[in-house]
Image (spheres, rainbow, N blue to C red):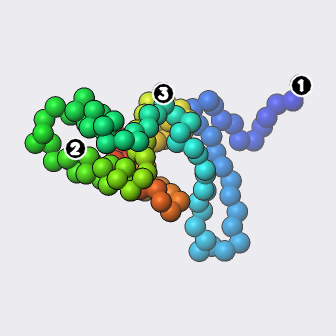
């Protein structure tokens, strides 16, 4: 029987050891995820957009919702589509990260804009 005698972890934490030759280099990781792998719907037409916003928002004085609608409308009018992506915090994984941190500070390829990307609850 082998016993691990160095670094011990449990299921709720882990440790990493990273070496860097350049002490000024940032220690960062870039991960590519397809947000369409999560629960999502697509809005491709003005009719679908109007239906979504009339169903989601009942108060036409909600300035934040009005700005979101305008940005979505611009995307659709230029031939694009709007993705409504839903993530749920189950306490683990990428969904939990996205739920807590949002997507406002993530880098996207050209042609992708974040219309609403706040994390938190």
Q: Is residue 79 above or below residue 3?
A: below
Report x, y in % for residue 65: 22, 44
Towards the viewer: 24 or 101? 101
Look at mark 2 in the image and give the residue it sits on.
65
Query: The residue tagged with tag 3: helix, strand or loop?
Result: loop
Residue 89 in view: no
The residue at the point 71 percent across, 41 percent down is 7
Crowding around mark 2 (Cα neighbors within 10 Å: few <14, some 14 to 19, many 20+) is some
Mark 3 against mark 1, which lies toward the viewer? 3
Crowding around mark 1 (Cα neighbors within 10 Å: few <14, some 14 to 19, many 20+) is few
The residue at the point 28 percent across, 32 percent down is 51
The span from disc 3 to disc 1 (Cα, nearest Å) is 36 Å
Label annotation for residue 90: 3
Mark 1 against mark 2, which lies toward the viewer? 2
The span from disc 3 to disc 2 (Cα, nearest Å) is 27 Å
Look at mark 1 in the image and give the residue it sits on.
1
Q: Is residue 45 above or below residue 39?
A: below
Q: Tell me which numbered mark, 3 or 2, is placed earlier along the sequence.
A: 2
Query: The residue tagged with tag 1: helix, strand or loop?
Result: loop
Report x, y in % for residue 15: 64, 45
Label annotation for residue 77: none
Q: Is residue 12 above or below residue 77?
A: above
The residue at the point 79 percent across, 34 percent down is 4
């Amino acid at each position: 029987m082998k016993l691990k005698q160095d670094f011990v972890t449990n299921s709720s934490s882990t440790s990493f050891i990273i070496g860097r030759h350049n002490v000024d280099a940032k220690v960062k990781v870039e991960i590519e995820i397809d947000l369409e792998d999560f629960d999502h719907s697509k809005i491709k037409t003005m009719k679908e957009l109007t239906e979504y916003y009339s169903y989601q928002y009942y108060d036409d004085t909600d300035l934040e919702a009005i700005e979101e609608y305008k940005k979505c409308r611009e995307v659709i009018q230029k031939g694009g589509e709007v993705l409504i992506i839903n993530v749920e915090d189950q306490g683990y994984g990428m969904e939990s990260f996205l739920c807590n941190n949002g997507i406002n500070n993530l880098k996207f390829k050209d042609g992708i804009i974040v219309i609403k990307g706040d994390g938190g609850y």
